[in-house]
Amino acid sequence: MAFPFSISNAYSIPAKPIIAVCTILLLCIFILSAHNRDTYKKPIAYIYIIQIVSALGLMLVHLDTAYINFALQLFIVFLIFLLLKDKLYIRFINHFINFIVIMAILSVITFFLCLVFNLSPYSEFINPDGRSGYNFLICFTNVFFDVGSFKIIRPSGFFDEPGTMAFYIVIAILLNDLTLDSNKKRIILIISGIFTLSIAFYFLLIIYLMFRMKMKYIPHLLGSLLLAAIISGILISRLDSEKQEVIYSYTLGRIDNLFSKQEESETYFKGDNRSDLIQLSLASIADSPIVGQGLSYSTNPKSVAYEGFVGANPLTLYAIHGLVGGIIFSLHVIYYFWICLNKIKFDLAIKSSLILLLLILQRPDYVGGILPYINIVLLLYATHKFRTNSARIHCNYSSI
């Protein structure tokens, strides 16, 4: 339930009891304030009810108690969605963006501490996906390399991996554009995202900048990128071969691996970390197309994905929950896109939805864990208000 954070894993904190207590408190608040709800929330409220019932239904089909936890996550977000009013939503969005900004700043600080002082991790732990994680106290990572007298890491904030950090940075950028419109936070988030060394983030960043810029400035953007590449190439060429190899593996080597069938070595990052996942997901769908393999597929000896992993690819939901379940658990995202496309021109809301679509196609982190659901809830609210008011929702609360 604490997904996508790794804090409970890194510090052995019992996350489930804490979240259970919070759920009871939210339920009490909901009962006390049930008389004052916004009517525009009805469609998404019905969607969450359908998803909760479906989760309980799949629990009976698979005899998988993990679906109880899944239904509880949906119920918590359902209560949050019903409870938050306009002012609270604005405050909530502001705090969410600030939280990601603070994590991003700490991640960049950790990157340079490792680069300059060869900082060693405070501890090692096991991430929710089974891979090793490394705790640098103010930032986690799941991979780093010692090269001579310095260390290179891909910071992941307090998330399970750098790609997840990049995912939430993009979400924070979109929310900032639709609401606060803080240029300072936008710059911090963009620069911090670069340090995750996520190829998907770089791709989305180029599209984002092209969306934001006028056509006449796009050649200037491309020229600046080319100049930065030339300067970086000159600086890297002055390093020794070992350092050049590591830098290559973090950058161009990851892109090269997307199109190369060469065997992966311990030195290089694998740029294409999706194809194997997609193949296993396809096999899972073929084996059980209607109801999927169930949430506990990796520990179920009867599952074709036993001891495997089918996450982090566009077919994840359909492999786990089947074609029917995958569609049902995507309804809140489908509704978000419908809100963006309904009776509005190609403006900021549409551009944000296109970027989100590209984002979730490569990393469908909108189901599983409370935070992924909250992302869509906040985007739904910001986009709905953006559509009805034809203007950004400005927040008067202090910035960091």
Image (tube, rainbow, N blue to C red):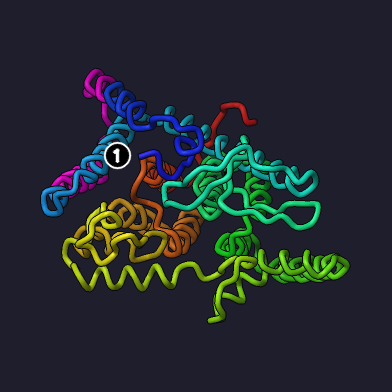
Q: Quadrant of residue 226?
A: bottom right
Quadrant for the C terminus, please: top right
Q: Position of residue 324 (x, y in %)?
A: 19, 62
Three-letter amino acid code at disc 1?
A: Gln
Decide which of 242, 86 is in the foreground and name it.
242
Q: Is residue 113 found left or right of 294 in the rendered image?
A: right
Q: Is residue 39 magenta?
A: yes
Q: Quadrant of residue 311?
A: bottom left
Q: Residue furthest right?
A: 238
Q: Main secondary structure of the magenta part?
A: helix
Where is mark 1, residue-wise? 73
Helix, strand, or loop for circle 1?
helix
Magenta segment boundaries in residue numbering: 27-56
Q: Residue at x 22, y 45 (%)?
A: 67
Q: Residue at x 59, y 54 (%)?
A: 143
Q: Is residue 157 magenta?
A: no
Decide which of 358, 265 is in the foreground and name it.
265
Q: Quadrant of residue 345?
A: bottom left
Decide which of 319, 220 is in the foreground and name it.
319
